[in-house]
Image (cartoon, rainbow, N blue to C red):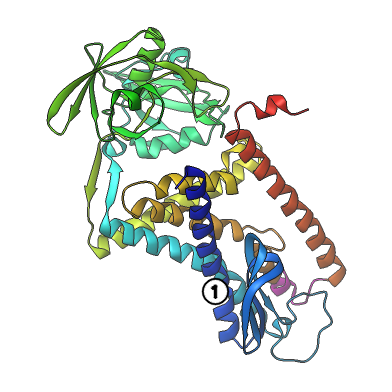
Amino acid sequence: MSDFLISVVSVVAVLGFMILIHEFGHYAVAKWLGVRVEQFAIGFGKRLVGFRKGETDYRINAIPLGGYVKMSGENPMDQRTDDPGEFMNHSRWHRFLIAIAGPTMNILLAVVLLTVVYMVHYEYPIYLDKAAVVQGVRKDSPAQQAGIQAGDRIIKIDGVENPTWEQFQPKVWLSPNQALDVTIQRGNQVLQKTLTPKAVTSSEVGSVGWFPEEPVVVGRVDPNLPAAKAGIKEDDRIVSLNGKPVPSIESMIEALQQTKNQPVDLQVERSGQTLDFKLTPVLSQTEDPKEQRYRLGFVNKGVTKVSQLPFAQALSLSLEQNKKYSFMILELAKKMVQRKISMRAISGPIGIAQDAGYAAQQKGWTPLMELTAGISLNLGIFNLLPIPILDGGVILFLLIEGLMRRDISMNIKERVYQAAFVFLVLFAVMVIYNDLMKTIPGLADRLP
């Protein structure tokens, strides 16, 4: 099966499942509270297939970009009757429970999926738990310009003291073109530094150009590039390059930019054996469409720790990780509103499809489940944002009306909903445009 077809099938399955779970949350609570559900739909537009059971039409529609549960009398602009099955005839508390049920199901799904994954296959890079000690600094990077040296230890950044690499990296990623105050320890000296991360990759996330010590273990091998042609395989550990030890993938990348297209000697450890290869790097596209560099053609996955966690520990870790990612999502949303970070940092359906396709091709089912958990959490948090039409907007109106002790004017609601609809359409167009810019190198230069 081609990569494109795998991506399409994977993203349809992942998004379809999450939409189903989300809408089921609304549906189940609405039915429980006695609200009549007229339609339970996956997708929008024309009805393709479905069936009717009782008062509800269960259907799949033509445009697979979401879903909805249509309840009787839910549109505040519709004429109201005294029918107790209508949504607007229920108390604000009931309407609040129905609105919050969808995002809650997505967040619970993320917790459940990660718990199951951690019970079956918990894997993470070992270096993330280590103190943030700089192994090397990229030439002409913000770190080099600030005088950072190999061996420096970051002891404070943005209020976090003695951070590990796992705590430290998101601070940099979410701060492109923004000054960061950093305290480092160099021997017996404590130095204060200010760095401004540079926006890199097609997502324009922040990077200061320093990197940790992380053994190089081959992950995905790009077909048709030198590593694949020479016989380099996944899980090969790179021991040396031209006779010199390779302490990190970044140091290897730096060395290849020096040798350029000259053949290099690579020593590899595979299943206890030491193998020697001679490869000629090629100038190739990177994750940043504006940058090319000399590459051998593989992705580093580093040394990882693999274990199976008992249920209680897996659940605790899942809750901790989801909490951490939730705050990162909110921080990202805040900085996008403040225009401190590019909208390119988010992915739309094309980016999600690429990630889903890659995860589906990995060993086992846990990578795809882990990705599904992440996307489900994003969907749940996004729907809780106070944007009218979304669940968060409905909740916001209910809270305002509760404080006012009366309903908001229908004219005001109608204008707000119209503006929100235009906003969401423009947002969707912008996200898809960003996906295209990141997916097709050079497209922006070819557009009029």
**x then y, percent, for residue 350:** 58, 45
Image position of 201 with respect to 418: above or below: above
Outermost residue, front side: 1
Magenta stretch, residue numbers:
400-408
Q: Quadrant of residue 71?
A: bottom right
**Amino acid type assigned to the residue bearing label 1 in the image:** Phe
Residue positioned 13% across, 28% down in the render: 273
Compared across the picture, whether 360 is left or right of 187 comes to right
Image position of 251 with respect to 158: above or below: above
**x then y, percent, for residue 225:** 40, 24
Q: Indicate yes or no whether the magenta region holds residue 401.
A: yes
Say if residue 63 shows up in the picture: yes
Q: Which residue is mark 1?
A: 24
Residue positioned 18% across, 27% down in the render: 269
Residue positioned 63% across, 34% down in the render: 437
Which residue is nearer to you in this view: 132 or 381? 381
